[in-house]
Image: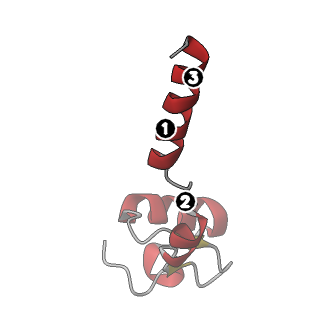
Amino acid sequence: MGNGAKANMKRERNAKDTKTAKSQIKSNEKAMTIQCQVCRQTFLQTTKAPALLEHASNKHSKGLPECFPGVNA
């Protein structure tokens, strides 16, 4: 068996092991559950209150309860 045949066998073996690439776009869109009530911008569900407060004060000059009523600080 020559080196060319070994390379082909290895390619075939590796082709069986490869998995199809999965995109995270849909799962990231589903995770965007926090929404600003003023501008309707969405945030990931794991976003912490300080980041939301920063958005509220920088974009709207408002507090956390006005922009994100369901979020507890």
Residue 37, position as x, y percentages in the image = 59, 85
The residue at the far top in this view is 3
**Residues packed near mark 3 inside 10 Å, few (<14), some (14 to 19) or many (20 plus):** few
Q: Secondary structure at mark 2?
A: loop
Mark sitting earlier along the chain (2/3): 3
Mark linked to residue 5: 3
Q: Which mark is residue 22?
A: 2
In the rendered structure, which amino acid carries the disc numbered 3? Ala
Q: Which residue is depicted at the point 46% across and 64% down?
A: 53
- Identify whether 72 is placed above or below 21: below
Sooner in the amino-acid sequence: mark 1 or mark 2: 1
Structural distance between the alpha carbons of marks 1 and 2:
18 Å
Task: Give above or below for 27 relative to 14.
Answer: below
| Residue 28 pos. (x, y %) | 53, 67
Label 3: state its secondary structure. helix
Q: CA distance from mark 3 to mark 1?
A: 14 Å
Dot 1: element: helix
Comparing marks 3 and 1, which lies closer to the viewer? 3
Can see residue 62? no
Give the quarter of the image for residue 15. top right
Q: Earlier in the sequence, mark 3 or mark 1?
A: 3
The answer to whether any part of residue 41 appears in the image is yes
Residue at x-position 64% and y-position 69%: 60
Q: Specify the quadrant of the image occupied by residue 12.
A: top right
Q: Any mark on residue 14, and which?
A: 1
Q: What's under tag 2, amino acid-wise?
A: Lys
Disc 1 crowd, CA 10 A, few/some/many (<14, 14-19, 20+): few
Q: Which dot, 1 or 2, sits closer to the camera?
A: 1
